[in-house]
DNA sequence: CGCACGATGCTCT
DNA sequence: GAGCATCGTGCGC
């Protein structure tokens, strides 16, 4: 049984905070002819256009250009010189908002993920925004600016029938640190930080 | 166990 | 030139 990609309307018909909440339980998939890895999204953060922590807060630049694309666009950026993080762009074209994917529960292609992450510890495979990018083999040149309705990186519907969601402030930022824009699946072992 | 810190390079000021 | 939506290690308790 192969789950279908979520349609564009899943990303375009809701505001950014709602999308961040509704992405919990959905499955992020990287599928190429030689590779199939995936994980259940268990932690997200919303970044809004009027939010000082948002990369698109000031203006459109080379780095953040993908954030201004239509909902369902992929935004990948490099952080601390050595890591990469992946976002799902939300809201209308021209408005720089997105949802950061912060943690996955490993689902398919676990051996491949273990090779990429150089660890067999399932808890360490994708329990952080840069960890999951490495585990799934997401790359900036290939995926930044791509669309979830086409291409090798996509999202399929929720596999969690019922769960409790926890809302907190976001992790690792100084600006906008008091905003309650982080969401995660309660008691899930793969959330980056309870 | 938890906390502190260094790695490392690009982007924007 | 400063700062960064992180991670892994190393040390102290």
Image: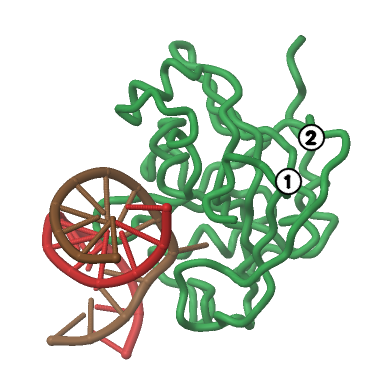
Chain colours: A green, B red, C brown
Q: Secondary structure beneath disc 2?
A: loop
- The residue sitting at 38% across, 45% down in the picture is A140
- Residue A71 location (% of width, % of height): 69, 54
Instruction: Depth check: give the residue in front, A1 or A41.
Output: A41
- A108 to A25, vertically: above or below: above
Chain of the residue under the numbered disc 1 shown in the image: A
Q: Is residue A3 left or right of residue A170?
A: right
Q: Position of residue A6 (x, y in %)?
A: 77, 35
Q: Is residue A192 above or below residue A92?
A: above
Q: Residue at x 54, y 55 (%)?
A: A193
Residue at mark 1 to residue at mark 2: CA–CA distance? 7 Å
Q: Are marks 1 and 2 in contact (CB under 8 Å)?
A: yes
Q: Which residue is identified by label 1?
A: A24
Is A121 placed above or below A91 here? above
Residue at x 68%, y 53% (from the top left corner): A184
Q: Nearer the viewer, residue A59 or A167?
A: A167
Q: Position of residue A160 (x, y in %)?
A: 80, 34
Q: Residues within 10 Å of mark 2 (few under 14, many from 20)?
A: some
Closer-to-camera residue (A16/A177): A177
Residue A116 placement: quadrant: top left
Task: Answer above or below: position of A171 versus A141.
Answer: below
The answer to whether A58 appears left or right of A49 in the picture is left
Q: Which residue is mark 2?
A: A158
């Amino acid at each position: 049984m192969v789950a279908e990609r979520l349609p564009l309307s899943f990303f375009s018909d809701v505001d950014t905070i709602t999308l961040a909440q509704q992405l919990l339980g959905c499955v992020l998939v990287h599928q190429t002819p030689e590779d199939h890895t995936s994980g259940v999204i268990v932690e997200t953060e919303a970044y809004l256009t009027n939010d000082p922590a948002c990369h698109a807060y000031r203006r459109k630049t080379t780095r953040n250009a993908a954030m201004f694309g239509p909902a369902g666009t992929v935004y990948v950026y490099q952080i601390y010189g050595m890591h990469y993080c992946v976002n799902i762009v939300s809201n209308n074209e021209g408005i720089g908002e997105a949802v950061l994917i912060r943690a996955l529960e490993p689902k398919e292609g676990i051996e491949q993920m273990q090779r990429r992450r150089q660890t067999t510890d399932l808890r360490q495979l994708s329990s952080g925004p840069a960890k999951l990018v490495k585990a799934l083999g997401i790359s900036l040149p290939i995926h930044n600016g791509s669309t979830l309705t086409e291409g090798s990186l996509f999202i399929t519907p929720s596999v969690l029938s019922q769960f409790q969601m926890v809302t907190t402030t976001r992790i690792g930022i100084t600006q906008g640190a008091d905003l309650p824009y982080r969401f995660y699946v309660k008691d899930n072992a793969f959330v980056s930080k309870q």
